[in-house]
Image: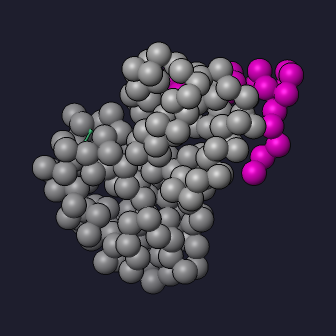
Protein backbone atom coordinates (compact mmCIF):
# COMPACT_ATOMS: atom_id res chain seq x y z
CA UNK A 1 0.00 0.00 0.00
CA UNK A 2 1.25 3.47 -0.87
CA UNK A 3 1.95 6.07 1.76
CA UNK A 4 -0.85 8.58 2.29
CA UNK A 5 0.02 11.73 0.36
CA UNK A 6 0.08 14.99 2.31
CA UNK A 7 0.34 18.71 1.57
CA UNK A 8 1.54 19.69 -1.88
CA UNK A 9 2.08 16.05 -2.74
CA UNK A 10 -1.62 15.49 -2.05
CA UNK A 11 -2.56 18.39 -4.34
CA UNK A 12 -0.35 16.99 -7.07
CA UNK A 13 -1.92 13.56 -6.73
CA UNK A 14 -5.46 14.98 -6.75
CA UNK A 15 -4.66 17.00 -9.90
CA UNK A 16 -3.31 13.85 -11.56
CA UNK A 17 -6.32 11.79 -10.54
CA UNK A 18 -8.81 14.40 -11.74
CA UNK A 19 -6.98 14.65 -15.09
CA UNK A 20 -7.06 10.89 -15.41
CA UNK A 21 -10.73 10.87 -14.40
CA UNK A 22 -11.67 13.44 -17.03
CA UNK A 23 -10.82 11.05 -19.88
CA UNK A 24 -12.58 7.96 -18.58
CA UNK A 25 -16.36 7.69 -18.64
CA UNK A 26 -16.31 5.25 -15.76
CA UNK A 27 -15.33 8.07 -13.41
CA UNK A 28 -18.39 10.03 -14.60
CA UNK A 29 -20.66 7.08 -13.83
CA UNK A 30 -19.04 6.77 -10.42
CA UNK A 31 -19.46 10.48 -9.79
CA UNK A 32 -23.18 10.23 -10.63
CA UNK A 33 -23.45 7.32 -8.20
CA UNK A 34 -21.76 9.35 -5.47
CA UNK A 35 -24.23 12.18 -6.14
CA UNK A 36 -27.08 9.75 -5.60
CA UNK A 37 -25.81 9.38 -2.06
CA UNK A 38 -25.40 13.16 -1.88
CA UNK A 39 -21.72 12.61 -1.23
CA UNK A 40 -22.46 11.16 2.22
CA UNK A 41 -19.33 9.81 3.85
CA UNK A 42 -21.22 6.83 5.25
CA UNK A 43 -21.84 5.70 1.66
CA UNK A 44 -18.15 4.78 1.33
CA UNK A 45 -18.68 1.01 1.17
CA UNK A 46 -21.48 1.33 -1.41
CA UNK A 47 -19.34 3.70 -3.47
CA UNK A 48 -16.36 1.32 -3.33
CA UNK A 49 -18.63 -1.51 -4.46
CA UNK A 50 -19.75 0.55 -7.43
CA UNK A 51 -16.15 1.50 -8.19
CA UNK A 52 -15.09 -2.14 -8.20
CA UNK A 53 -18.09 -3.04 -10.33
CA UNK A 54 -17.01 -0.42 -12.88
CA UNK A 55 -13.26 -0.98 -12.89
CA UNK A 56 -12.89 -4.59 -11.80
CA UNK A 57 -10.54 -3.62 -8.96
CA UNK A 58 -9.71 -0.62 -6.81
CA UNK A 59 -6.52 0.93 -8.10
CA UNK A 60 -4.77 3.72 -6.18
CA UNK A 61 -6.09 6.55 -8.37
CA UNK A 62 -9.60 5.26 -7.95
CA UNK A 63 -9.33 5.19 -4.16
CA UNK A 64 -7.95 8.72 -4.19
CA UNK A 65 -10.80 9.82 -6.45
CA UNK A 66 -13.38 8.32 -4.08
CA UNK A 67 -11.70 9.95 -1.08
CA UNK A 68 -11.63 13.29 -2.86
CA UNK A 69 -15.29 13.09 -3.86
CA UNK A 70 -16.47 12.02 -0.41
CA UNK A 71 -14.09 14.45 1.31
CA UNK A 72 -12.52 11.58 3.23
CA UNK A 73 -8.81 11.19 3.94
CA UNK A 74 -7.11 8.59 1.73
CA UNK A 75 -6.13 6.67 4.88
CA UNK A 76 -9.81 6.08 5.69
CA UNK A 77 -10.59 4.92 2.14
CA UNK A 78 -7.56 2.61 2.05
CA UNK A 79 -8.47 1.33 5.49
CA UNK A 80 -11.96 0.29 4.45
CA UNK A 81 -10.83 -1.07 1.07
CA UNK A 82 -8.20 -3.27 2.69
CA UNK A 83 -10.39 -4.41 5.58
CA UNK A 84 -13.08 -6.13 3.53
CA UNK A 85 -12.06 -9.24 1.64
CA UNK A 86 -14.51 -8.56 -1.20
CA UNK A 87 -12.49 -5.57 -2.35
CA UNK A 88 -9.58 -6.21 -4.71
CA UNK A 89 -6.94 -3.51 -4.56
CA UNK A 90 -4.67 -4.71 -7.28
CA UNK A 91 -4.82 -7.42 -9.85
CA UNK A 92 -1.83 -9.62 -9.24
CA UNK A 93 -0.91 -9.98 -12.88
CA UNK A 94 1.43 -7.79 -14.91
CA UNK A 95 -1.45 -7.26 -17.37
CA UNK A 96 -5.14 -6.81 -16.77
CA UNK A 97 -8.10 -7.63 -18.90
CA UNK A 98 -11.50 -6.39 -17.70
CA UNK A 99 -14.47 -7.77 -19.63
CA UNK A 100 -17.65 -5.71 -19.31
CA UNK A 101 -20.63 -7.91 -18.54
CA UNK A 102 -23.18 -5.08 -18.38
CA UNK A 103 -26.43 -5.57 -20.28
CA UNK A 104 -25.42 -3.90 -23.57
CA UNK A 105 -22.17 -5.86 -23.71
CA UNK A 106 -23.79 -9.07 -22.57
CA UNK A 107 -26.47 -9.08 -25.27
CA UNK A 108 -23.73 -8.52 -27.84
CA UNK A 109 -21.78 -11.56 -26.76
CA UNK A 110 -19.55 -10.47 -23.85
CA UNK A 111 -20.14 -13.85 -22.21
CA UNK A 112 -18.60 -15.58 -25.23
CA UNK A 113 -15.69 -13.15 -25.21
CA UNK A 114 -15.09 -13.92 -21.54
CA UNK A 115 -15.38 -17.67 -22.09
CA UNK A 116 -12.84 -17.49 -24.93
CA UNK A 117 -10.32 -15.63 -22.78
CA UNK A 118 -10.90 -18.02 -19.88
CA UNK A 119 -10.26 -20.98 -22.17
CA UNK A 120 -7.15 -19.41 -23.69
CA UNK A 121 -5.64 -18.30 -20.37
CA UNK A 122 -6.88 -21.37 -18.49
CA UNK A 123 -8.19 -19.25 -15.65
CA UNK A 124 -11.62 -18.07 -14.53
CA UNK A 125 -12.81 -14.49 -14.14
CA UNK A 126 -11.33 -13.03 -10.97
CA UNK A 127 -8.16 -15.14 -11.26
CA UNK A 128 -4.56 -14.51 -12.27
CA UNK A 129 -2.45 -16.87 -14.34
CA UNK A 130 0.09 -18.86 -12.28
CA UNK A 131 2.97 -16.94 -13.90
CA UNK A 132 1.23 -13.70 -12.84
CA UNK A 133 1.17 -12.33 -16.35
CA UNK A 134 -2.58 -11.85 -16.70
CA UNK A 135 -5.40 -10.99 -14.31
CA UNK A 136 -8.85 -11.54 -15.77
CA UNK A 137 -11.60 -9.41 -14.26
CA UNK A 138 -15.18 -8.46 -15.05
CA UNK A 139 -17.06 -5.21 -14.63
CA UNK A 140 -20.63 -4.03 -15.09
CA UNK A 141 -21.21 -1.22 -17.58
CA UNK A 142 -18.03 0.73 -18.05
CA UNK A 143 -19.83 3.56 -19.86
CA UNK A 144 -18.99 2.37 -23.36
CA UNK A 145 -22.32 0.77 -24.33
CA UNK A 146 -22.17 2.36 -27.82
CA UNK A 147 -19.13 0.24 -28.65
CA UNK A 148 -20.30 -2.96 -26.93
CA UNK A 149 -18.99 -5.45 -26.24
CA UNK A 150 -16.09 -3.55 -24.75
CA UNK A 151 -13.03 -4.90 -22.97
CA UNK A 152 -10.41 -2.88 -21.08
CA UNK A 153 -6.88 -4.14 -21.73
CA UNK A 154 -4.27 -2.61 -19.42
CA UNK A 155 -6.50 0.44 -18.93
CA UNK A 156 -7.37 0.97 -22.61
CA UNK A 157 -11.01 0.43 -23.59
CA UNK A 158 -11.23 -1.51 -26.85
CA UNK A 159 -14.52 -1.62 -28.81
CA UNK A 160 -16.60 -4.39 -30.36
CA UNK A 161 -14.70 -7.38 -29.12
CA UNK A 162 -15.21 -10.87 -30.45
CA UNK A 163 -13.89 -14.10 -28.93
CA UNK A 164 -11.21 -14.08 -31.66
CA UNK A 165 -10.11 -10.47 -31.22
CA UNK A 166 -10.00 -10.85 -27.44
CA UNK A 167 -7.90 -13.99 -27.62
CA UNK A 168 -5.56 -12.30 -30.11
CA UNK A 169 -5.18 -9.41 -27.69
CA UNK A 170 -4.23 -11.48 -24.64
CA UNK A 171 -2.29 -14.21 -26.43
CA UNK A 172 1.00 -12.35 -26.31
CA UNK A 173 0.72 -12.04 -22.54
CA UNK A 174 0.37 -15.76 -22.06
CA UNK A 175 3.28 -18.22 -21.79
CA UNK A 176 2.27 -20.10 -24.93
CA UNK A 177 1.70 -16.87 -26.87
CA UNK A 178 3.76 -15.77 -29.86
S1 LIG B 1 -22.79 -2.54 -20.73
FE1 LIG B 1 -20.73 -2.68 -21.26
S2 LIG B 1 -20.21 -0.63 -21.53
FE2 LIG B 1 -22.27 -0.47 -20.89
Q: Position of residue 121 (x, y in %)?
A: 40, 76
Q: Which quarter of the figure is the C terminus placed in?
A: bottom left
Q: Write down which quadrant ligand 1 falls in.
A: top left
Q: Position of residue 6 (x, y in %)?
A: 85, 28
What secondary structure do most residues of the magenta stretch adopt? Answer: helix
Magenta residues, as a range?
Answer: 1-23
User: Is 111 left or right of 22, judged from the image as shown?
Assistant: left
Q: Is residue 28 visible?
A: no
User: Is 24 left or right of 106, judged from the image as shown?
Assistant: right
Residue 9 within the magenta-colored segment of the rendering? yes
Relative to 65, is 131 above or below? below
Compare residues 107 and 160 and report the one nearer the observer: 107
Compare residues 43 and 141 and report the one nearer the observer: 43
Residue 84 within the magenta-colored segment of the rendering? no
Residue shown at 55%/80% (left/top)? 130
Compare residues 12 and 56 and report the one nearer the observer: 56
Residue shown at 34%/77% (left/top)? 120
Amino acid sequence: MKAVPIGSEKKRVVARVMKHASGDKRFKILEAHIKKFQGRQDSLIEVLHKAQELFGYLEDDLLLFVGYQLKLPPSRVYGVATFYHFFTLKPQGAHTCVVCLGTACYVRGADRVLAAIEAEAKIKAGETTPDRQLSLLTARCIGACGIAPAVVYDGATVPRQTPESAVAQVKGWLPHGP
